[in-house]
Image (spheres, rainbow, N blue to C red):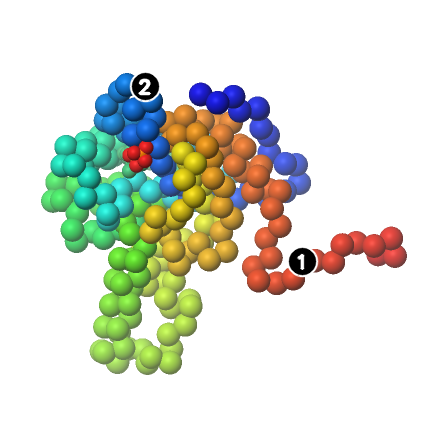
Amino acid sequence: MEYVPPASLVPGRPVPSHVAIIMDGNGRWAQARGLSRTKGHRKGVEALRDTVRNAGELGVRWLTVYAFSSENWKRPPAEVRDLLGLLKRFIRRDLAELHREGVRVRIIGCRDTVPDDIRPLLEEAESLTRANTAMDLIVAFNYGARDEMVRAVQRIADRVADGSIASKDIDQALVSAALDTASIPDPDLIIRTSGEQRLSNFLLWQAAYSEFVFANCAWPDFDRNALLRAIAEYQGRERRFGDVAPLAETAAG
Ligand code: FPP
C-alpha cells in the first residue's frame, strides 16, 4: 500500500456537512492479493464501518455511500448474490450499533425492484432509526441517478395530471423534493476511491456544486487518514456556487 503522510483538519475551515462516497476498488484490491472479489467486498464492509465512525467523529452530519447501483445487476450472479448477502449481514449485524450511536439510516434507490427478502430489512433499518439525530447514513442501494430522476419526473407528472400542481409551479425546489434525497442537503464533498475519475450515475442532480476528491487507494484501504486527507483537501477549496471570488482584502481594507 502506498505511503500516505498523516493528515489533519485545517483549523478555521468548515468540515463538509455532507460527504458522499463512491466506494470503488474492492475487486482490484482483492485481485492484487490473489484473493477472491468476495474477500475484497468483505474488506470493503469493514472500511465502511470504520468510515461511518470516523466521519461522525470528525463532524460530518450526512454520509452517503454508493453500495449497489442499478447497473450492478449486470455483474456475474455469484457476485450479485454476494453483495446482497453482505448488505443483509451489514443491516442485521450493524443496525443495533448504528442505532445506539444515534445514526439515522436512510436508503435511496428504487425500492420496487429490490428482492423481497431485502425490502423488509431496509424498512426496518429506516423505521428503527427514524428519530436519531447524531448523523444520517444514507445508503444508495439499487440506485442510479438517471433512474431516480425518471421516477421523480413520473411523480411530478402524476401531480400535474391530478391537478394538484400546475406545470408552471415546477421549480428546482420541487424537483429536489421529488428525488429520493428529499430533505437531505446536497453533498458538499464527493469522494471516489481507486483512482477512477467519474460519477458513474451517482447523485447527478445533487452534485451540481459538490467538490470532488479522487483518492488513489482502493476502498478497503480507505482509513481515517485517507478520510482526513480528503476533508483537508476540501477545506482548501474555495466554493463560489457560480458567484465571483470574494475580493482579496487590501491594506486599505
Ligand atoms: C466497487 O468495487 C464496489 C462496489 C460495487 C460495491 C461497494 C460495496 C461495498 C463496499 C460492500 C457492500 C456494502 C454494504 C452497505 C454492505 P468494484 O467491485 O467495482 O471494484 P473493482 O472496480 O476494483 O472491480
Label 2 element class: loop
Residue 128 locus on image (x, y percent) = 27, 41
Label 1 element class: loop
Type of amino acid under label 1: Ala
Residue 33 - label = 2
Residue at image point 23% right, 43% down = 72
Read off the residue under disc 1. 245
Residue 56 locus on image (x, y percent) = 46, 35
Identity of the residue furthest to the right in this view: 252
> On screen, 198 above or below 84?
below
Identity of the residue furthest to the left in this view: 116
Compare residues 169 and 120 and report the one nearer the observer. 169
Type of amino acid under label 2: Arg
Residue 98 locus on image (x, y percent) = 34, 33
Residue at image point 57% right, 24% down = 6
Q: Left or right: 157 with respect to 215?
A: left
Q: How busy is the neighbourhood of tag 2: few (under 14 within 10 Å), some, or many (20 plus)? A: few
> On screen, 82 above or below 167?
above
Spatial CA distance of label 2 from label 1 is: 46 Å
Location of the N terminus (image quadrant): top left
